[in-house]
Amino acid sequence: MTAPSLDRHYQDFLHSLKQRIQAAQVRAALAVNCELITLYWQIGRDILSRQQAQGWGAKVVTQLSQDLRQAFPDMKGFSRTNLLYMRAFAEAYPEEAIVQQVVGQIPWGHNIRLLETVKDRSERLWYAQQAIAHGWSRNVLVHHIERQLYQRQGEAITNFETALPKAQSDLAQQLIKDPYNFDFLTLEADRQERDLERALTDHIRDFLLELGVGFAFIGSQYAMEVGGKDYRIDLLFYHVQLYCYVVIDLKMGEFEPEFSGKMNFYVSAVDHQLRSPRDAPTIGIILCKSKDKTVVEYALQGLNKPIGVSTYQLSDALPEDLQGTLPTAEQLRRELNQPIP
């Protein structure tokens, strides 16, 4: 008889038990976190109501901090600063249902960062929901807040509404940003598309973080043969939530109408050669330095392949007060070629 450790049925059984235990551990951790956040909200609510009803000043928070830390010496979280955060937390979310269903599902440190950096309530709740959905760490949450993801989400100009089924169209629209922030790149003024592509692939981790959750990198200069000729796609991805290929074409200048025709060709080629029956329609994204809204809308009209047009920002611009004060590359070359006096 085969030893239990080597039996396939036993291994399957063990694997299923491990999954159940891990899922239970996650649920337990979430439940503990939610209980703690709810406790903090209740403390903040009571401080707020007592101060309003009985006219207590700020000194009562200092006294309360001292008494609570003395009563619970092994429990962290009762500093004066944290009690003030609890008060602000309860003031920001008067409804306990919001605490239970949304902000109670993320760690206290996440909530503090949201209170400190995001003033609009709707925007704050949006970031909290995204952190829950995608498991963002605090650093990733701060990263997206600093780069104003809320304002950029879903702002690309696309034809998704007419080229995709509604469910996929809505999700795809929300996943594409405008502009994309490539401040992790440093490029020379005379850069070309190929230089931008190389820089993005050299910084693929930062690039994927900026693209957002779900993008899996397949390759750059991806070769496609059509009609006996070789063509190369700048960047090819697969999106694990949309279940489709995503073609990205990089342009260093302003959007031109002919870009959409070229992208339509690339998307058609990927659909024909790579897409399987279980895949959703391939999506094309044209990334340009700038665009005119009307020109883009005209260029996308009548195309049956889903294409979006977004812009990107680089961090190579000098502050306005320095522009014009530094020598150009040509001036430096002339200076260096001069003999030393």
Image (tube, grey):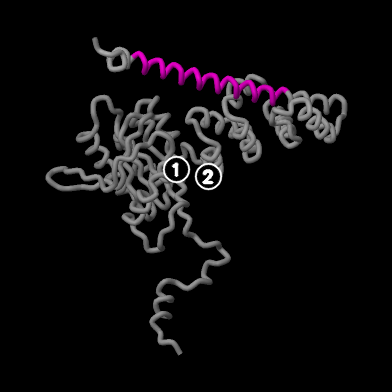
Quarter of the image with the N terminus in it: top left
Q: At numbered mark 2, what does the secondary structure look like: helix, strand or loop? A: loop
> Which three-letter amino acid code belongs to the residue tagged 1?
Glu
Sequence-wise, the earlier of marks 2 and 1 is: 2
Residue furthest to the bottom:
341
Q: Residue at x 82, y 25 (%)?
A: 50
Q: Nearer the viewer, residue 100 or 246?
A: 100
Q: Where is residue 190 in the image (x, y as percent from the top left)?
A: 37, 63
| Residue at the image point whose x is 51% and y is 31% from the top | 130
The structure residue drawn at horizontal position 46% and vertical position 17%, both measured from the top left corner, is 21
109 versus 204 height, above or below: above
Q: Are marks 2 and 1 in contact (CB under 8 Å)?
A: yes
Q: Does the magenta stretch include residue 145?
A: no
Q: In this view, does 23 lie above or below 211?
A: above
Identify the secondary structure beneath mark 1. helix
Location of residue 216 (image quadrant): top left
Q: x and y percent of residue 217 in the render? A: 33, 40
Q: Please indicate whether residue 167 sits to the left or right of residue 61 in the image.
A: left
Around disc 2, counting alpha carbons within 10 Å, would you say few (fewer than 14), some (14 to 19), or many (20 or more)?
some
Residue holding disc 1: 210
Front-lying residue, 96 or 150: 96
The amino acid type of the residue labelled 2 equals: Arg
The circle drawn on residue 147 is 2
Main SS category, magenta section: helix
Q: In which quarter of the image is residue 163?
A: top left
Q: CA–CA distance between discs 2 and 1?
A: 9 Å
- Left or right: where 209 falls relative to 219: right
The vertical placement of 160 against 188, above or below, is above
Residue 40 within the magenta-colored segment of the rendering: yes
* Magenta range: 13-42
